[in-house]
Structure formats: structure tokens, C-alpha cells
Image (cartoon, rainbow, N blue to C red):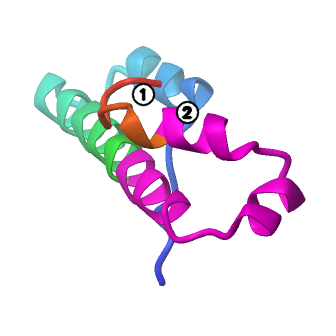
Amino acid sequence: MTHAATLTNDALAVLNTTRSLPLLAVVSVKFAACVTKWATRRRTRLNLDQLEAWQLRDVGITPDAARDEMRKVFWRA
């Protein structure tokens, strides 16, 4: 399994203040960060369905909370 590194708001703020990057580069990085965040949410929510009740309790999530999280669409936090 691979993990994609996501950019924090601080990292994106640096890109906004840097004058040397063209606008298209800044927009592309923001788009890539957004898509990466969405993909991570989708993968995580799909994997919640594979966990047993004891595993959910181990990470501090009730089965009902996991079910609610799985029902969310990937663009919702």
C-alpha cells in the first residue's frame, strides 16, 4: 500500500506568496493536493468496511460512527 503525502495549508500558503511560480503551477499544485485528499478519504472510507468491531473499538470508532463515515461522499470532510 502506498501513502500519498498531502500538502498542509501552510505549504500551500507558501506557494501563494512565492512570486516565482506561474499561476498555472500554483493552481496545478492546489488541484493535486485536493485530488490526493479526496483519494485518501475514499480509500479510508472503503477500508472501514473491512474492519471488525473489535478493530474499530481499538481505534476509538463505534460501528455506527464507521457506518456514518462510510456513507459520506469523498469530497465531504
Q: Amino acid at mark 2?
A: Ala
Q: Nearer the viewer, residue 10 or 61?
A: 61
Percent position (x, y) of residue 70?
Answer: 44, 43
Above-or-below relation of 2 to 12: below
Percent position (x, y) of residue 39?
Answer: 33, 52
Q: Is residue 23 magenta?
A: no
Q: Nearer the viewer, residue 44 or 8?
A: 44
Percent position (x, y) of residue 77?
Answer: 47, 25
| Magenta range | 40-69
- Marks 2/1 in contact by CB < 8 Å: the verdict is yes
Q: Amino acid at mark 1?
A: Leu
Q: Nearer the viewer, residue 37 or 31?
A: 37
Instruction: Please tell me in which quadrant of the rendered image residue 33 appears.
Output: top left
Q: Which mark is residue 11?
A: 2
| Label 1: element kind | helix
Q: Which residue has dot 1 on it?
A: 15
Percent position (x, y) of residue 14?
Answer: 52, 25
Q: Of all residues shown, which one is farthest toward the bottom?
A: 1
